[in-house]
Image: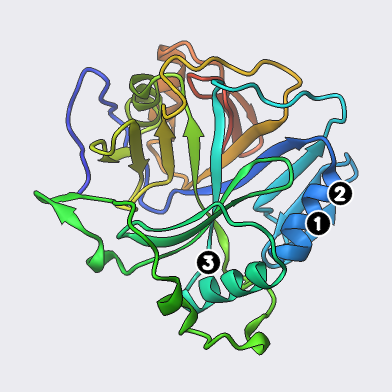
Amino acid sequence: MVDKRKTNLMKEYILPDATRIGYVHLTVSDAEKVSAFYRDLLGFCENRNDDGVIGLSANGHTPHHILLTENRHAKPRRPHTTGLFHLAIRVPNRIELARMFFKIHERRYPFQGFADHGVSEALYMADPEGNGVEIYVDRPMDLWPKRQGRLHMTTDPLDVNDLMNEIKNDSSAIKDLHPETDIGHIHLQVSELSRAEKFYHGILGMDITQDSYPGALFLSAGGYHHHIGANIWSGEGAVRPGKDFLGLAGFAIHIPDSPDKDLLLSQFSSNRIEISQKGKSYFTHDLDHNPIELIFE
């Protein structure tokens, strides 16, 4: 059950169920080094655009899941600033998660942690420039834990041995990245949870799926556990990193086109948030000024 409560922030528009996260765009200082992590370690296919942007996808075709723009003059993101907490790569089944674990472990790339969230099982690490990366698989929706009728995600230890039983530690299990791999969600460090709620729930139209986790807020469309995570774990009142800093350069949300689209777009003008159109896409930003491309399809 998701929270569709009516508040003074409540929107009139509700995102269609099939809404999903598209690409995550990163500014990096060494594109080749970072691309090698996603390409050679995780298995994404690489395409280089004429504008110098590197696109990475699971199946070798567009749309891309990760975009990399190199800026050798960009500075490292400062502590206590808003931006990316992690991008979340979703694999389609548990065998694929076991394969990813085995491959990363065999190549001795460091993990930062493992977790069983009830709704999913997850591996955590960072790319070579410190961008947080989660790799996870969802449990069937009917197994997602509830408390008092509402979704209740947790952070418990992951049973790695049980996960590895999926492939029996067989080195032949290392295969190419499954073509159905995608970006399942994005998790942001924000200035205030109330501002994240105002934008992603009150303006964009996502439902609040969980607000009981300390210092965090989770939102989604279509009953998913979360497409957007927001936290203030580095402290409330985080500030924008400013221009020419490494890290999150933006992300995309794919939205099925509907007659109610104009109702959504009117939310931006009524809240004095800049939005511009190019083709089927609209470019805007959240209240922490993270750039967002809304792709209507």
**Position of 53 compared to 240: left or right?**
right
Q: Tell how many labels.
A: 3
Q: Amino acid at mark 2?
A: Glu
Q: Compared to 296, does 107 lie above or below?
A: below
Indicate which disc, 3 or 1, sits on the residue closer to the N terminus: 1
Give the alpha-carbon distance from disc 2 to disc 1, as whole Å: 6 Å
Residue at the spot of label 2: 32
Q: Amino acid at mark 1?
A: Ala
Residue at the spot of label 3: 91
Q: Are marks 3 and 1 in contact (CB under 8 Å)?
A: no
> Horizontal and vertical percent for residue 39?
76, 61
Q: Residue at x 36, y 60 (%)?
A: 157
> Horizontal and vertical percent for residue 48?
86, 51
Residue 101 placement: quadrant: bottom right
Q: Residue at x 23, y 50 (%)?
A: 152
Question: What secondary structure is marked by label 2?
Answer: helix
Instruction: Categorize mark 1 by other alpha carbons within 10 Å: few (<14), some (14-19), many (20+).
Output: some
- In the picture, the disc for residue 36 is 1
In front here: 8 or 80?
A: 80
Q: Are marks 2 and 1 in contact (CB under 8 Å)?
A: yes
> Horizontal and vertical percent for residue 248?
64, 33
Foreground mark, 3 or 1? Answer: 1
Give the alpha-carbon distance from disc 3 to disc 2, as whole Å: 24 Å
Residue 281 placement: quadrant: top right
- In the picture, the disc for residue 161 is none
Determine if residue 46 is in view.
Answer: yes
Q: Residue at x 72, y 30 (%)?
A: 246
Determine if residue 296 is in view.
Answer: no
